[in-house]
Amino acid sequence: MAMPQNSTGENGFCFAQTLNFSRPSLHPGEAGQTFDVPSGQEACGTPLSNGTVSSAAPSPSDSCAKPLCSPSPGEEETQFGEGIKYVSDEGEELACGWGRFTPGCLQLFNTSKGVLFFLCMASFLQGMTVNGFINTVITSIERRFDLRSYQSGLIASSYDIAACICLTFVSYFGGNGHKPRWLGWGVLVMGLGSLVFALPQFTTGRYEARLAAEVGICGGNQSLPCAQAASSLSSYRFIFMLGQFLHGMGATPLYTLGVTYLDENVKTNYSPVYIAVFYTAAILGPAAGYLVGGMFLNIYTEIGRETDIAPENTLWVGAWWIGFLGAGAASLLISIPILGYPRRLPGSQRYVVMRVSEAHQLKDGSHKKASDPDFGKTVKDLPRSVLLLLKNTTFIFLCLAGATEATLIAGMSTFGPKFLESQFSLSASEAATFFGYLVVPAGGGGTFLGGFLVNKFKLRCSGIIKFCLLCTVSSLLAILIFFMHCPNMPMAGVTQMYDRSALPGGHLNLTAACNAECGCLQETYSPVCGSDDVMYYSPCHAGCKKGSENLRNGKKVYHECSCIEKTLLPGPGDAEAGKCTSSCAKRPLLLFFMFVVILFTFLSSIPALTATLRCVPDRQRSFALGIQWIVVRTLGGIPGPIAFGSMIDKSCLLWQDQCGEQGSCYVYQNSAMSRYTLVAGLVYKVLGTTFFVVACLLYKPPPAESAPGSSDAFENGNGDLQEHKPSLPAEEDI
């Protein structure tokens, strides 16, 4: 069989003599195959792939992984009788395994899809633990270990603090090191963090709930102690902070080195899809965390021990620790296969050969320094690496745009349920469920769809930035829906007087003639809905004298409420525990446009990440993602909830009174909440739009003639090095 001649020299390979390539026989005695090449051409060139393959069966990369020439001196020879063995052109092992233990069955997973599966499992566990379980159990932890809100907030912030500390080190040295080992050890550390977080359950005594006399009914025992002795249990917050710190350390490689490892081992056109699947798993993780964590909270924390407390009781503490044990064990197991992957997958070098450079071109040409193979291997190159990224204006403005989007995402994820709870008069669990219905399809679907569209239309870096700009403008228009709001449900003494007249000067007045003799305490907030469709601060403030043991629609009913008049018969009315149901006609419209805002916000996330990877030199990709995460967290993720929270607090009508100290907000003014949410959303969306516009205008792509592999065949995904497609990039371009 004669190899085709190449008269143009396009692929950079020529041959001077007949080369005999004998494939090892599948059965004893089977003859090898000989390829005769016409003489008169010079034998030169480089291997087609990054590794040679020698096996007793066709290798996974088959046609593109066989060598054209015999191994060079110093290159590792392979023995056919030892099963499958992958060796790079530099003598580097490319087999999947641990040390010398590389069984052939494991090589089935030594593919980009195998890596994607295990990284998706790791990102799913990270999202479920950090963004799911933590947010679900934080109230139970406060109750169990006598923590204050600012202490639990510090526990949550420990994750971001650890990530910011480790990002520079991990992304710089890990980007030039063995990425799967960094990833595997990171997932292992994350698993240890989950186990540490659950540790206080097993080092403390049993939880003893102290049932007090019933308060809240007119004429009942209204005594409520203000000062309580300081509990030593609050010292366990340092254990929780350590667990979260380990979570942050372990997750740092996942979203920097994991993304670049996927990007390096797949075709350029497929990279956005792989990254989108990876991030979609990370978004579905919190949804699973909320569902599974909520299920565990219905189990009493002291398993096997009976209690008279119902889950609805404020003294109830659920089994908050089970999820962390399961997630920790699963993370330890997932880290084992990740640690077994090679530095790069077999056949991945062909994607490097085909890759079209789209790095932003600096005026002084200093970006070429990053192409040096020895660049970035020592600490002395760290300042120069940072300087190169700071000179890359496109990268800087993409980071700033990402920070504005992260601020909105962090703010809405934190206060989105609170917004729905206030606007539609929902309970906290109902609001969380509604918000979950919005975030899972809009966030997860938008993330995957963004990567799919980049691959579908084969967008280059400039086109990707324009696509992000389009998504930001679309969400900017949709956010104008916050001009609308649902009216507050009438609440006696808060939004109106007890006789339904307007409050004088907007001042609260929870005391009226009908409840003056009840001695109600403002510390006891337990809203009820009267038969007159007016909400009251508590059964006591409604003048209710009796509580029925029989439930109506699953809610406790109070009778003989002197502040409530029956609609048909004269005499005191009754009330149901909980808020009155809102019949706001604007609910479908608000929910739809909130869905659109979330969809277009997440739709630009993977394209923006892809643009970041493409606008920097290949050797700086991991480090660039690390720097971007630092910017996003310090300017967006950490201050985002604080900024949104401070603006929303301005719309509070009724604050909690903790023995003279201001606590959390009970009731918000819906119109003011919508107005402040609109202002915050517009500010950050306008900033994001501006940053994307500037990034697009300043982006300077490399000249087409100097881009390696810049043919249309490569960009259209048809540039695989197949036997029937002999054309290759010119040697001088590689």
Image (cartoon, rainbow, N blue to C red):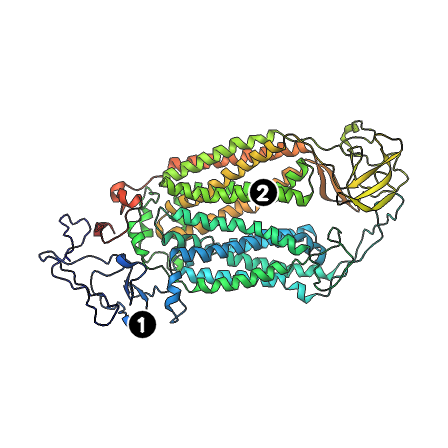
Q: Residues within 10 Å of mark 1 (few under 14, many from 20)?
A: few
- Residue 94 or residue 18, whichever sits in front: 18
Percent across and percent down for residue 509 are: 81, 34
Q: What residue did someone put label 2 on? A: 437
Indicate the position of residue 229 as horizontal and vertical percent values.
79, 58
The residue located at (46%, 58%) in the rendering is 118
The label number, if any, that marks residue 82 in the structure image: 1
Residue at disc 2, secondary structure = helix
Q: Residue at x 57, y 49 (%)?
A: 287
Q: In this view, does 613 lie to the left or right of 228?
A: left
The image position of residue 266, as x and y in percent, is: 36, 52
Left or right: 535 as drawn, with respect to 338: right
Q: In this view, does 595 lie to the left or right of 715?
A: right
Q: What residue type is labelled 2?
A: Tyr
Q: Identify the secondary structure beneath mark 1.
A: helix
Determine whether 202 is above or below 353 in the image.
below
- Picture quarter containing residue 48? bottom left
Residue at image position (27%, 47%) is 709
Q: In this view, does 316 lie to the left or right of 548?
A: left
Q: Where is residue 383 in the image (x, y as percent from the top left)?
A: 41, 53
